Image: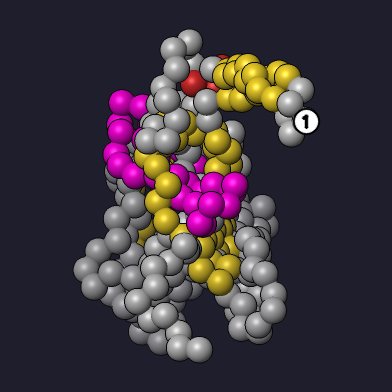
């Protein structure tokens, strides 16, 4: 028997459809009125229209028979992602939108796809696209074994997700939370970057280092305070100079403060220069180096040795 190479597929467009009621959440099924095959009855919403037919006749024995047939003005159709196989959610179609209804031969099961842009009818949506991150055959991928992108006006969120099921060292999530006004970048090691657009805050949390590099300047400015805190050390180091300037006061406090200069250590005060020690305070210079103390008023201290 020769194959019929010119045979047409039995899967075909059955009719234009009119959505009878809003699609339910992430469900693949809708109720749609097949506009080309059923007469459009009057009676309000398509989902509420009912058909009621009375048929009279005789059976094979010639006995009169009356039959009553009830029906609705819509068919139930399942979404099929024709040419859009990476889409994981059916379009959020709403009442009165236009769709295409598909059918295989005369089978009583119907399928649907969206057809056109109808911005006056389309409302909140939830769309997810995904690509599989599974290598082995015979498994079904899910949110933890795929890389996926969600944009949802229904949930007021946009999110990009990467999985780590194939021994990737870390997984990432980038989330725009439009309801809270935040942008979050986080990974599976609890490193995170949080931009709070409502409160004007930026938070960065890293398990190890944060490095900033610029070929010219790095400028940090705050209208209020700049607070630096470390559990071990804070190190200031420059190949040339370190300059500290304050309009009011510059205060350094510690159990020990060490100031070392290979050549000159200068201390100047317009009024008072106070150096106090509970026991002995000393300024020492040796090997021909200089100790210069320039004071217009007083030098005070418990006991200060200039050597």
Residue occupying the point 46% across, 50% down = 102
Residue 233 at least partly seen: no
Looking at the image, residue 11 sits to the left or right of residue 288; the answer is right
In the rendered image, which residue does mark 1 sit on? 61
Q: Is residue 302 visible?
A: yes
Q: Position of residue 289 (x, y in %)?
A: 36, 80
Write down the region rendered in magenta: 98-126
Q: Between residue 176 and residue 137, name the one nearer to us.
A: 137
Mark 1, other Cα within 10 Å: few <14 / some 14–19 / many ≥20: few
In the structure shown, which secondary structural element does the residue marked by tag 1 occupy?
loop
Asked if the magenta segment contains residue 105, the reply would be yes
Give how far across and how far down residue 185 sits, in percent: 50, 56
Above or below: residue 139 compared with residue 203: below
- Above or below, 28 relative to 161: above
Q: Residue at x 54, y 17 (%)?
A: 49
- Judging depth in this view, the residue of 21 and 237 nearest the camera is 21
Q: Quadrant of residue 142?
A: bottom right
Seen at 56% across and 72% down, the residue is 132
Instruction: Write the residue at 49% across / 52% down.
Output: 103
Count of all numbered marks drawn on residues in the image: 1
Q: Nearer the viewer, residue 150 or 96?
A: 96
Q: Residue 160 placed where, x, y %?
A: 48, 57
- Is 103 within the magenta? yes
Q: Measured from the top left, where is residue 175 in percent x and y? A: 50, 50
Q: How is the image coloured?
A: secondary structure
Instruction: Give whichever of 152, 3 is nearer the camera.
Output: 3
């Amino acid at each position: 028997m020769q194959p019929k190479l010119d045979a047409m597929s039995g899967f075909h467009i059955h009719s234009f459809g009119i959505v009878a009621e809003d699609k339910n959440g992430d469900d693949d099924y809708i109720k749609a009125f097949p506009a080309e095959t059923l007469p459009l009855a009057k009676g309000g919403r398509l989902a509420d229209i009912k058909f009621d037919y009375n048929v009279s006749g005789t059976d094979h024995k010639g006995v009169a028979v009356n039959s009553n047939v009830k029906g609705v003005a819509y068919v139930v159709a399942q979404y099929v992602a024709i040419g859009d196989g990476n889409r994981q959610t059916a379009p959020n179609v709403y009442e009165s939108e236009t769709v295409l209804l598909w059918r295989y031969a005369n089978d009583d099961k119907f399928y649907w796809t969206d057809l056109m842009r109808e911005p006056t009818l389309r409302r909140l949506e939830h769309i997810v696209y995904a690509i599989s991150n599974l290598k082995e055959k015979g498994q079904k991928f899910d949110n933890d074994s795929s890389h996926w992108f969600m944009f949802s006006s229904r949930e007021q969120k946009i999110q990009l997700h990467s999985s780590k099921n194939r021994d990737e060292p870390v997984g990432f999530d980038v989330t725009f939370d439009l309801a809270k006004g935040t942008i979050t970048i986080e990974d599976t090691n609890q490193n995170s970057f949080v931009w709070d657009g409502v409160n004007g805050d930026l938070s960065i949390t890293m398990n190890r280092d944060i490095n900033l590099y610029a070929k010219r300047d790095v400028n940090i400015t705050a209208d209020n305070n700049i607070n630096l805190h470390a559990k071990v050390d804070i190190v200031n180091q420059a190949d040339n100079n370190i300059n500290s300037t304050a309009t009011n006061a510059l205060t350094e406090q510690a159990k020990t403060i060490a100031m070392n200069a290979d050549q000159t250590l200068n201390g100047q005060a317009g009024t008072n220069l106070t150096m106090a020690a509970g026991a002995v305070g000393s300024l020492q210079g040796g090997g021909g180096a200089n100790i210069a103390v320039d004071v217009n008023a007083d030098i005070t201290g418990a006991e200060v040795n200039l050597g």
